Image (spheres, rainbow, N blue to C red):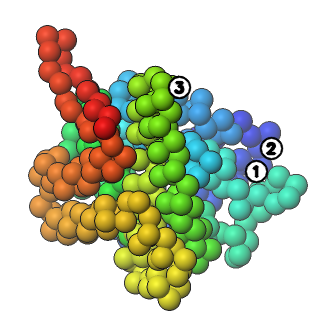
Amino acid sequence: MISLEGFANEADANSLGNTVMSIVRALYEKHQLDLTNLKRILISYDFPNALKRVTEEYNHTSPSSYTNSKQARAIAQLITKGAREEFTLVLGIEFFFEWFNNDGKFELTEDNIHFVLHRIHHELIHVHEKNVLNCLDSSLLVDQYDDALLMSATRSWSEYLANLNSAYSAPQETVTLFLEQLDSVIKEVPNEIETLVLQYQCKLIPLDEMYLAVKDRIKLIANSYAYAFGYVDALGIDLNDNFPELSQNLVECKLSDVIHKLVVSFRTLTKLYDEGAIENYDAFDEVVKVIDSMFECFGLTLERTQDENGTGLYIHVG
């Protein structure tokens, strides 16, 4: 179940693998997680290539759900084979950085165990969610329109749910980090999007380049909000008292009204999930509408087109 790649020290590899296996078993038993078809956890020093290889092995055609940016860096990805034949969880070595000392040796202590334990808990919630929502076809082939909206909606809500349901294993430092990251994102990323749109309007970059960069940033905003408010809702955090600067920035940012609607849609969808009432992707319609309105805030309107070659995407820039 545990595979390790790129380790120079066999003892460190064995210690890490055994520790991860013990934590997975403990979380599985304590929280009654459905880990059906989680066939492998792959831990690699070369995360991008490991992810690429597993994706190709599984013939996984859905677009990647993570974004590499100065605000967020990918270190974990759950890959699905077929509808739900099996899952592989790919983890970069950075996922475990607290467990390695300054000499690069594996060293587990009472002070550092909880950081990585929580990350593992978060990832296992994703596996559990996929098994609970077996009515959703994870091998669904999506067009460009669905990738921008439906996939962004499902993935951002999934991150909200994972932090909501794993929050009690999170160290305070981790919670603070995600809330500070959200603050950074809402202060920086909307300006980046406005600059990209302006560059396109001034004919400095082509439409496709502008759109893809904007789409990634919209996903980053939605995911950052989802991560942070999973903790906020689970732990009952009062932002006004504990994170006043973030609270003020959320009110004053360009997307203030939209991101408030986003968390409302997350909560509504989570209630349906808890009641076993999600039957198909239509349940995500309200989240999709909010993601769509994020594009509209920056003057972009997305339209699905249809011709003899199939569906396409038309981007109105106003």
Rendered location of residue 75, percent (x, y): 58, 47
Quadrant including the C terminus: top left
Residue at image x 26%, y 54%? 290
Instruction: In this rendered view, identify the residue nearer to me: 316 or 166.
Output: 316
Residue with the mark numbered 2: 9
| Amino acid type for the residue under numbered disc 2 | Asn
Q: CA distance from mark 2 to mark 1?
A: 5 Å
Give the mark, 1 or 3, whose residue is nearer the N terminus: 1
Rendered location of residue 55, percent (x, y): 45, 29
Residue 128 can be seen, yes or no: no
Residue at image x 53%, y 69%? 179
Task: Kindly give the residue lying farthest to the right in the view shown.
Answer: 103
Rendered location of residue 188, percent (x, y): 55, 55
- Dot 3 and dot 2 residues touching (CB under 8 Å): no
Does 205 appear above or below 310? Answer: below
Q: Give the side of residue 186 with respect to residue 48, left or right.
A: left
Residue with the mark numbered 1: 12
- Disc number lying in front (3 or 2): 3
Dot 2: within a 10 Å radius of its alpha carbon, few (fewer than 14), some, or many (20 or more) residues? few
SS category of the residue bearing label 3? loop
| Amino acid type for the residue under numbered disc 1 | Asp
Q: CA distance from mark 1 to mark 3?
A: 50 Å
Residue at image x 55%, y 77%? 245
Residue 315 can be seen, yes or no: yes
SS category of the residue bearing label 2? loop
- Res. 285 mark: none
Q: Please tell me in which quadrant of the rendered image residue 254 appears.
A: bottom left
Rendered location of residue 121, percent (x, y): 48, 63
Residue with the mark numbered 3: 204
Dot 1: within a 10 Å radius of its alpha carbon, few (fewer than 14), some, or many (20 or more) residues? some
